[in-house]
Amino acid sequence: MRGDQLAEKHVVVIGGGPAGLTAGYELAKFDLRPVVLEKEGLVGGLARTETYKGFHFDMGGHRFFTKVEEVNKMWQQVLGGEFLRRPRLSRIFYNGKFFFYPLKPLNALLGLGFFQAVLIVLSFMWWQVFPYRREDTFEQWVTNRFGRRLFLTFFKTYTEKVWGISCSELKAEWAAQRIKDLSLKTALRSMFIKPKNTIKTLIEEFDYPRRGPGMMWNAVKSEIEQRHGVVRLNSGVVRINRTDKHIDSVVVQHDGVEEVIPGTDFISSMPVTQLIKALDPPAPATVLSAAGRLTYRDFLTVVLIINKPHIFDDNWVYIHDPGVNVGRIQNFKNWSPDMVPDPSQTSLGLEYFCTEGDKVWTMADADLIEMGRREIDRIGLARYEDVVDGCVVRVEKAYPVYDSEYREYLGVVREFIDGLENCQTIGRNGLHRYNNQDHAMVTGMLAVRNLVLGEHHDLWSVNTDQEYHEEIREPARVTEHDLEEVLEGALSQVFLKLDRVAMGISLGLNAGVLLFLATLMLVLKGGESGAHVGPTLGLLSQYFPGYTVTAAGSVLGLLYGFVSGFVVGWCFAFIRNAAVFLYMAFVHRRAELQALRRLLEYF
Amino acid sequence: MADEKQALERMVLTRALRLNATVQGIVTGLVAGLGVFIATNWLVLKGGERVGPHLSLLGQYFIGYRVSFLGSLLGFFYAFVIGYVVGYMVGRVYNWAVDRRDHKRLGHA
């Protein structure tokens, strides 16, 4: 795009979260002076940092860990010196004990006790032999793979807390979707291609801004403003004016006053459902209806300030105890010591998954703090009387719900949005997709490239698979990726089964011909007059009745050789295939466990 | 992408492995050759009144072979050739049989 064309652009970015601010930052680098609209009083969206009496709280916990080079580059450019490298530890807290996930045998044995561990193994074996015939629900899906007892211990409670419905009502498709990338190809890859060391290191430790992720987004806001862009807080979009497929302006409400903000191009990270509802004139009824059926899961954090310098080592723990409502607990001090103003105190964030308007969501803050105090005492992580203060932060639309019908409805919405000439949606809620912070940022970056450079990135497919990583990598990385593809193709050939009959025929024919020739050769060579020909080879008659080292015996040897060679070849192929199958099943199951770990970390 | 993954799974579950006859031949040849070489030299190093009376029977097939160091080199050569031929033929016959069976199966499908 030429300079004069760029100068005519007035880009409005809706949403001041990671996606929107990244888009604003990239636009500012092109001297486009964007207007970023944020409805809250602080930037960062779902990755904001709230504060209370000098304590800083990260909503949900945001590790600064990415495989996308450009995202990492931006983080370092904006906040380089303010990052801390932190160790990562997150375990399951169940029945008063910490468990690693995936389970480590010794840790599980010590935590669960020998008797319980044996029952889990027996249950696993039972469900391997007698699985549910149908896998309609999440409960059936997990039970078939890990056994009922393990399901009840480590999957049921937490999943139900997160989704608010019984695992027997949750569709199996949900789990299947979450691990859809877990193909045979992935399993084969995991067997032979180890993750790069850098990635492994980053999983075990991660970067974190000294005072939480909000620090990053405040710095990005400043960068935008230094380049003459505008970031407007407390400016929620209430209406979007359009002429057919062209967005003309947005109407924001600030301190109860409405203001029209015109623009030539719009990038929106506001929830796609709200965007559709805000259109004026309204979107078609089918689109409105589809948008109305897309749902979200929300959560609230009850922050408890505790008069103890140390509570536990983890950055966060998953609470699987069915007797309490809390789903996950963040230990902000373990993310960064600077998150607390007084080192003799600790702040914990008790996260309650709920739905806007439900019983938990509407509870008074004081009641929520009281519930948090009781629950932290009950599970034994801190004593009731050690909690000296607290506050509550509610996070709306934290997780787009992937129910069994969301694809269909999102497809309708997407088709309509794609039809708008000058509007792109980005970010987790703009795309109704579980994009983490870095993926959300990528959508912001790519949207700006589409707008300014005329590129054609499909923002909806970011994070659907690994390929997008390659899009913005250096060319050398693409070559490496290609090599992996070739290697995977070759590896998959190794795991093809041997044809048992063909192997039998092959070994049989060769053994038969070999014995035939060996016998005939000795017969033709002959021996001294009257001497017995081939006494050693003749010993084969012990196994092959009637076999002799004679011309007739060579024909019988051909037959015997074929039969025994066939049996050996057939058995070899059978055992080899069985061994490969068992090995593949083992690898696949192990990879499923890894995938379920990722599933746990979505929240 | 999903189609590609499914196709890969289908392929692994239904298709039969093909052997590379040349590789198979070389591997079998090397194993057989080294087997004879080591077996011969083992007996040579052990020594004794009469060295390797049974192994020397290979001389019936490997003309010139004896249980000695030079014989072990000759034995390696012979065994490699025989092993190569056998391995190669196992690969070729196996692939031929698989093709025939595939052809038959697909023809009836």
Image: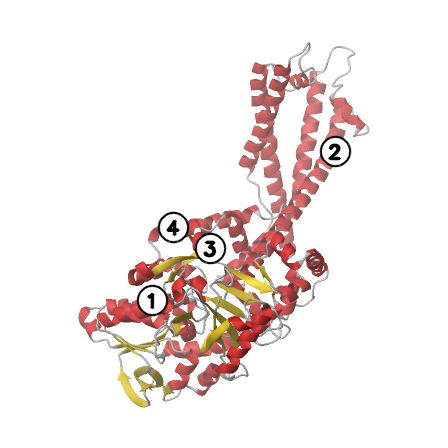
Q: Nearer the viewer, mark 4 or mark 3?
A: 3
Measure how far apart labels 2 and 3 are at the Cα level: 63 Å
Residue A138 image point, x, y percent? 61, 69
Q: For marks 4 and 3, give the CA distance.
A: 27 Å
Numbered mark located on residue A559 in the image: 2
Label 3: chain? A
Tell me which residue sits at (38%, 85%) in the image.
A278
Badges 1 and 3: C-beta atoms under 8 Å apart? no
Residue A216 has which mark? 1
Determine whether the residue tagged by mark 2 lies in a helix, strand or loop: helix
Q: Is residue B58 left or right of residue A450?
A: right
- Give the mark toward the camera: 1 or 4: 1
Q: Mark 2 belongs to which subunit?
A: A
Q: Could you tell me how far apart the alpha carbons at marks 1 and 4 are, in whole angstroms?
A: 33 Å
Q: For residue A204, which numbered disc appears in the image?
A: 3
Q: Which subunit holds the residue at mark 4?
A: A
Q: Report which residue position mark 4 lands on.
A: A479
**Tag 1, which secondary structure?**
helix
User: Residue A330 appears at what percent x and percent y?
Assistant: 48, 67
